[in-house]
Image (cartoon, coloured by chain):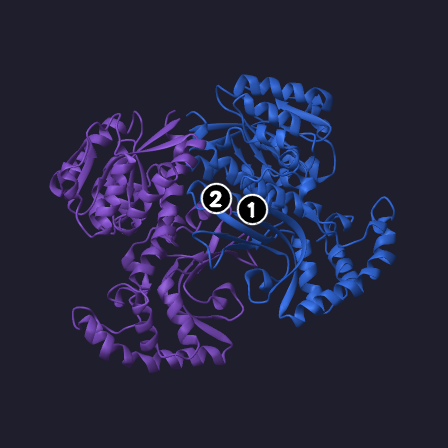
Chain colours: A blue, B purple
Amino acid sequence: MKNIPLILMGCGGVGRHLLQHIVSCRLLHAKLGVHLRVVGVSDSKSLVLTSDVIKAELNDNFLSEVCRVKSDGSSLSKLNDLGDCKVFSNSESRTKILDIASVLGKSTGLALVDCSASSETTGVLTQVVDLGCCVVLANKKPLTSTLEDYDKLVSYPRRIRHESTVGAGLPVISSLNRIISSGDPIHRIIGSLSGTLGYVMSEVEDGKPLSQVVKTAKSLGYTEPDPRDDLGGMDVARKALILARLLGRRISLDSIKIESLYPKEMEPGVMSVQDFMENGLVKLDNNIQERVKKASLNGNVLRYVCVIDGSRCEVGLQELPKNSALGRLRGSDNVLEIYSRCYNEQPLVIQGAGAGNDTTAAGVLADILDLQDLFPL
Amino acid sequence: MKNIPLILMGCGGVGRHLLQHIVSCRLLHAKLGVHLRVVGVSDSKSLVLTSDVIKAELNDNFLSEVCRVKSDGSSLSKLNDLGDCKVFSNSESRTKILDIASVLGKSTGLALVDCSASSETTGVLTQVVDLGCCVVLANKKPLTSTLEDYDKLVSYPRRIRHESTVGAGLPVISSLNRIISSGDPIHRIIGSLSGTLGYVMSEVEDGKPLSQVVKTAKSLGYTEPDPRDDLGGMDVARKALILARLLGRRISLDSIKIESLYPKEMEPGVMSVQDFMENGLVKLDNNIQERVKKASLNGNVLRYVCVIDGSRCEVGLQELPKNSALGRLRGSDNVLEIYSRCYNEQPLVIQGAGAGNDTTAAGVLADILDLQDLFPL
């Protein structure tokens, strides 16, 4: 049986689902000859480690308890007096993780799994790579930091996986990596990579006012608590940057042209969420409706997409043919169209649910399993 | 630099393109830290080996010459007096390959790459797996042989790759493997996996007679020399079987319900190709046209698909909603819809060119690169 020791950083929605998946897949993974040994879990405040990181693990009962505590919205520090573990504060955790990485990285191997949404993990992740560890990311921040950080993270390309940073569990990164390694040059990627904006644009296409659509989306839980986090396009821009860097583009976030769906005078620092929802949004209705109409007159539809084409990398509204995978998109599915030598006239299209904790966690788990050949028997 | 020794079986269209890709990707692969060392190549008549299989390789000039000879339709035996190689006859080649597999399999590793279309490779492939070798297949035959052969081939699941057996280079198998390893149960797969039949059905949908469409497809080189090889559905059935077995179904080719588009009295043994094209086909026009009309009255379209649903595995014509990925399919693209827990209401859809030597060879090359962690530095 192959043993994969791992530390999970971030036990929010995705991390919690990952732990549940790990526990429920025990039998399946045993059949595949793999055991995932969870050595530690951390949230923003604490790191919980098994008492013996060389041999022991946080067992399945303990992991279930972690899930319970986190779904109650409590902190991991609550687990202090539970079973064979040690709890460390946030200030100690980085040193602790580096200690473990030094010990395990080059002997048994160690996977650092980042399901947080924090940029604070970047430091420790760039360091563990050099210690022989593997890195699995659902967190976009480390990959969208400086080029220097990026280069460090991918310096051993086989030791990093980050499928769930783009399109949740959709096989986007793994497919792009296959195309790249086969020497098939990708010259264009265009995608709708925000379930929220995909939903918004297909509803607006049906004639509904933007303000009403966003309010409905918020009430359905489709948006972030502050919908401007979706409407501003930054999340899509991070995904675009990850894809562009995968294709070898030496760019950073600030060189991506990002179109925000709201103007500067409605930014979070200027306007409260409530004010934006009640008074700001409605002022945007006319402009969007006119653009939708104009697109329709051209036989097109309006989509919020990321485009990587040659040296161009941008994120915003585009008129697209009704009769393309992107044009036909309805609801909250993500779609990616990839154009290369092999997929020239017709693109390679990958489409499906691109959000959700369950799906995102499944993508992370597949990434971990895919690293198994790097771990000794 | 990681060294991956490989033997290529089958130097027809796909194999020849693979050799070209290997040569043209030297720089790219060097950047990835990998060198593909081609130790031998074979066609149906001969096996050509480098004189020193432990250290040497058939160099790029030699490989280019192989491509030239094969694209002229000649046999590899022609290369007898060229450079540092040895040529063996078909009767010696199996023993020779097993000898090399014994020597290299557990020391440096060895990949057997089957780009032939023959069932005769099954024997040697099932044997090399036990000798520590990796197997990469574009050839569907070994995977659609008996369950006993199948079990042998996949007995070390990490050592076998066969992306290009279904949908050419489309990331179908790799994506299914990801979903499976993440414990997301797949309950339904439906796909259009024949570019030829996809083209035929979308042309027939436009009102053209089947006989005319097939004649055009043949003249465009979209069909096999005998179009009945496409119209009979056996090729799609093999792909369906490969997918079903990947999902764990313990079935064989004879338990798949296959709908042929021509009746028994027009089978190859009964009717010549010419007779079928000139007199047979036209008798099928009415029936197909009626079914297309009936589907259309139901708001559906007719597609030739494979369906794997629970224990059901069948291949044939189905009425499908116009407004689904399969219903919207035009031309020769392949489409696969995957339904699982994570992709429940809306499927995960993978679509794109599913044929062509270039694309198929690119899929094989990506598979080989994906095995790299199993080879020692």
Numbered disc 2: what chain? B
Kind of residue indicated by mark 1: Gly
* Left or right: B308 as drawn, with respect to A99: left
Q: Residue at x 68, y 61 (%)?
A: A201
**Quadrant hosting residue B126:** top left
Q: Quadrant of the C terminus of chain B?
A: top left
Q: Quadrant of the N terminus of chain B?
A: top left
Kind of residue indicated by mark 2: Arg
Percent coordinates x, y for residue A263 in the rendering: 81, 52
Q: Nearer the viewer, residue B5 or B305?
A: B5
| Marks 2 and 1, how far apart at CA | 9 Å
Q: Is residue A87 visible?
A: no
Q: Residue at x 44, y 77 (%)?
A: B206
Checking the image for residue A169, the label placed there is 1
Q: Secondary structure at mark 2?
A: helix
Percent coordinates x, y for residue A57 in the rendering: 56, 25
Percent coordinates x, y for residue A69 in the rendering: 70, 35
The reply to whether discs 2 and 1 touch (Cβ–Cβ < 8 Å) is yes
Numbered disc 1: what chain? A
Q: Nearer the viewer, residue B310 or B262?
A: B262
**Quadrant hosting residue B315:** bottom left
Residue under circle 2? B178
Q: Residues within 10 Å of mark 2 (few under 14, many from 20)?
A: many
Q: Nearer the viewer, residue A159 or A8?
A: A159
Checking the image for residue B312, the label placed there is none
Q: Residues within 10 Å of mark 1 (few under 14, many from 20)?
A: many
Count of numbered circles in the view: 2
* Left or right: B82 as drawn, with respect to A361: left
